[in-house]
Amino acid sequence: MKRVLITGANGLLGQKLITELIEDYELLATARAPQPVLQSPTFLYRRLDIENYRACKAVIEDFRPEVIINAAAYTNVDGCEVEREACWRANVKGVENLVRAARNRMIQIIHISTDYIFDGTNGPYAEEQRPNPLCYYGKAKLASENVIKAAGLPYTIVRTSVVYGVGVAVKSNFFLWVYQRLRQDKPIRVVTDQYNTPTWVDDLAGGIHLILNRPFLGVIHISGPDFIDRYRMAVQIAQTFHFDPSRIIPITTDQLQQRASRPLKAGLKIEKAIQELGFRPKTLKESFEFLKASLSK
């Protein structure tokens, strides 16, 4: 059974990767916390801070994975604008450490990136289009891609967009924020001019599973099929869960005054994943119905 090491295993994507891959691979889940949030005897867990090269080397030499899935990242876009050193350590230096530790064994790395490496003037974007990040988060993620490409290792860079879903003690995401606020009947302000291709985390984990099965090398986009603005996404959430959509106040990005610049028309084209992997993501409407059933339990 192929050995797969997952970083960032306590996050939303990390948790879904564990549940998605557990039956087909021998897994070592890692994260900064002393204990995993998912408790099961069917996978191994070790504490790992990828910003520590010696720790990366020790874990990789001990477990000897054939694939590393790097789901660890600092993803708070506005936070990255303020805490630039922390952003760089997590999103670039950590990747450099993994690459350096993996090089002796030529371990394949699957690295998660973002549509925020593009400037949002002409989205959704195909894999070969030229990046031009607007914010520090996007610049750091683009730098991490370049580290991977220059490493001389077999690699897959998976770009995704606005990942949403539910998990155990996970940080908030756009879906959870809208759901929780509207459930409490609180008003929210949501922008009408930021477009992405929102990605249900279950689909993202499933897409990575397809990559492992191939295996696929290179750059590929794994996201949802809907190219939609945040306001309309929030309205769909309200309609699915029978919340009051009038609590959603439409605004524009300049009114929101976010610290970091956002690409207004980002998002990703997924034809390559559909054709080469057989990737079939759920629509927003379909995924919201699954989430509704899950949350009702």
Image (tube, rainbow, N blue to C red):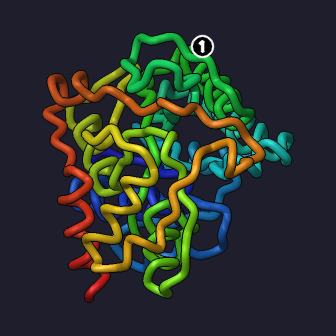
Q: Residue at x 52, y 20 (%)?
A: 121
Q: Give the position of the C terminus as an image quadrant.
A: bottom left
Quick check: 256 above or below 102?
Answer: below
Image spot of residue 225 (x, y percent): 25, 39
The one of 295 and 249 positioned closer to us in this rendering: 249
Image spot of residue 150 (x, y percent): 60, 13
Image spot of residue 237 (x, y percent): 34, 66
Residue 32, quarter of picture: bottom right
The one of 256 and 46 positioned closer to us in this rendering: 256
Which amino acid is tagged 1?
Ala
Quick check: 234 above or below 147?
Answer: below
Q: Is any part of residue 247 visible from this angle?
A: yes
Quick check: 65 above or below 133?
Answer: below
* Mark 1 crowdedness (10 Å alpha carbons): few <14, some 14-19, many ≥20: few
Q: Which residue is mark 1?
A: 150
The one of 47 and 197 positioned closer to us in this rendering: 197
Q: Is any part of residue 54 visible from this angle?
A: no
Image spot of residue 289 (x, y percent): 20, 69
Q: Is residue 264 left or right of residue 288?
A: right
Q: Residue at x 13, y 33 (%)?
A: 278
Q: Secondary structure at mark 1?
A: helix
Q: Is residue 40 left or right of residue 140?
A: left
Q: Residue at x 62, y 47 (%)?
A: 73
Residue 152, quarter of picture: top right
The one of 283 and 36 positioned closer to us in this rendering: 283
Task: Tell how many labels.
Answer: 1
Q: Residue at x 47, y 32 (%)?
A: 109
Residue 215, quarter of picture: top left
Q: Is residue 134 left or right of residue 191?
A: right
